[in-house]
Amino acid sequence: MKKRTKIIIVVSILLIIAIIGIFNLVVYLDRKIGVNIVTVVDIYDNRIVHAAVATERNIGYPLDDVIIKDLNLNEIDRANVQAGDYIYLYVKEDNTGFYCSSTNYYCRVERINENSIDVQIPDFNFYSFNAEEANIKDINGEKISVSDLKYGDNIKVVNIWPDIIPAVAALYQGYSSDTLYDVKSIRMIEPNQETIEKLENRNMMAIKNAVIVGVNENSLFVVDSENKDLLYEVSFANEGNIGYEQGQEVTIYFNGKVGSSDINGVSAIEYVGKIEINDGNKQLISNDILKRFFTSYVNVNVNIDNLTNTGLSLTVTDNNNIKYEFENEFLLFKNIAEKPEQRKIEYEDGSVSILPYDGDKWQELSRISNDVENIGTAEIVDENTTRWTIDWSNIYGTLECGEYRFVMGDAGDEPNNFLTNGYDKEIISVKFTIDDNGEVVDYEVGKGH
């Protein structure tokens, strides 16, 4: 075989190998390169881009769980609704885990059956990525920088390793935002006007009617008009304070998501498109609701004046404008749990686990008499201060050595859940220890619901 022929064969083999390699590389990269067409919604620090795709979410609800309303929020019968209609849906109890319950949602009817209604509710997929190292080009192919991108730009993003995107990386305006890693190139394309319009209206998709409880510098405290157990702190819309006053009924347009507030038992509506003040007489706000927003245990001081194995006296100073109401009734509990520092568990295979102590277990003391009321005496010192004197010796007797908890107020059905669950009204608790000599050796005061 001639030398030239050998060279041709070797080159041919190498070419075939190269073609196969390139093909496999293309297949591999095709699986590892993500192309995402999104709309820019924000630029942070000239490097982090927030973008989104406006979509719709299909949700089916049992008709028993919803109230159908027209676009003026007037309730309508399901017989007057057909596929394609735009309505507001009032959800009595939303179990989807996505939207806030007791809110009117703007949606399009897909179908309405005998027992259920299927609707399309606006939804948004958000993305965040670092564009510092990306090759960015405008619609004409000219190179531009991150700072040239602006709200509403439609862009095509090419990134590597899209399969390692976490399910939820962050939050952007109340929505989960996925992170796109290793962005290689960004190319502006023709804008999608429908997407931009949906994004601009994303904070208008849900409606809640509420009554103003209080006005802060940048937010409102409100109570739901239809469910007085639902309390919210509501951020102002861009228009700011337009003359809000306590007792006004307002309509709040927002993105449908509700988070948590710093106030216990109060939720937060953060992304608000508009707040309208409704015409009508102002409503009176009950003290129970006002107390939730404007009364704090931080402003309550409890001082133990005397504590023995037969009773105690304490002074409560409440500097809140709306006072707490502590019931003149008490219970006494003992910690009956065995309290080793650790507990040992032996398994069938011979192994041993050393676990920490299980925790306290409180049980009301047996009463030596049911003929005596478990109440104390109250002395009004001034408008903010009350001194309480409690003698439990005729009810529970003289306390022996052990760990105890005194609770003044309504202990509810769950006496072990001190300061958390089980209380309908305010309580004061005192945890204390009696030694072998019948003396109190330490105590801890608690206050809460």
Image (spheres, rainbow, N blue to C red):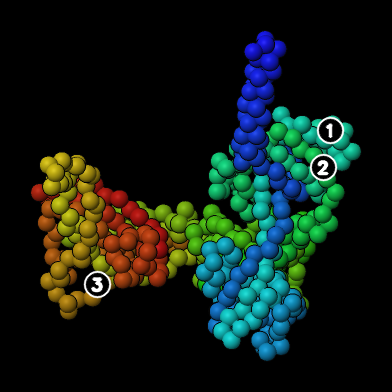
Residues marked 1 and 2 touching at CB (< 8 Å): yes
Q: Earlier in the sequence, mark 3 or mark 1?
A: 1
Q: Does 235 sit above or below residue 290?
A: above
Mark 2, Cα crowd under 10 Å, few <14 / some 14-19 / many 20+, is many
Q: Which residue does the image show at 87% across and 33% down from the upper left?
A: 142
Image quadrant occupied by the N terminus: top right
Asked which secondary structure carries label 1, the reply is: loop
Q: Which residue is mark 1?
A: 144
Q: Which residue is mark 3?
A: 374
Can residue 48 be seen at all in this image of the molecule?
no
Position in image of residue 183 (x %, y %): 68, 35
* Contact (Cβ within 8 Å) of mark 2 with mark 3: no
Query: What residue sits right under mark 2 in the picture?
Result: 188
Measured in 3D between alpha carbons, the distance from the residue under mark 1 to the one under mark 2, in whole angstroms, is 10 Å
Q: Nearer the viewer, residue 82 or 75?
A: 82
Give the alpha-carbon distance from disc 3 to disc 1, as whole Å: 78 Å
* Amino acid found under the numbered disc labelled 2: Met
Q: Residue furthest top?
A: 3
Residue type at mark 3: give it: Asn
Q: Mark 1 Cα within 10 Å, few/some/many (few <14, many 20+)?
A: some
- How many other residues sit within 10 Å of disc 3, few (<14), some (14-19) or many (≥20)? some
Q: Nearer the viewer, residue 264 or 54?
A: 54
- Label 2 vs label 3, nearer the camera: 2
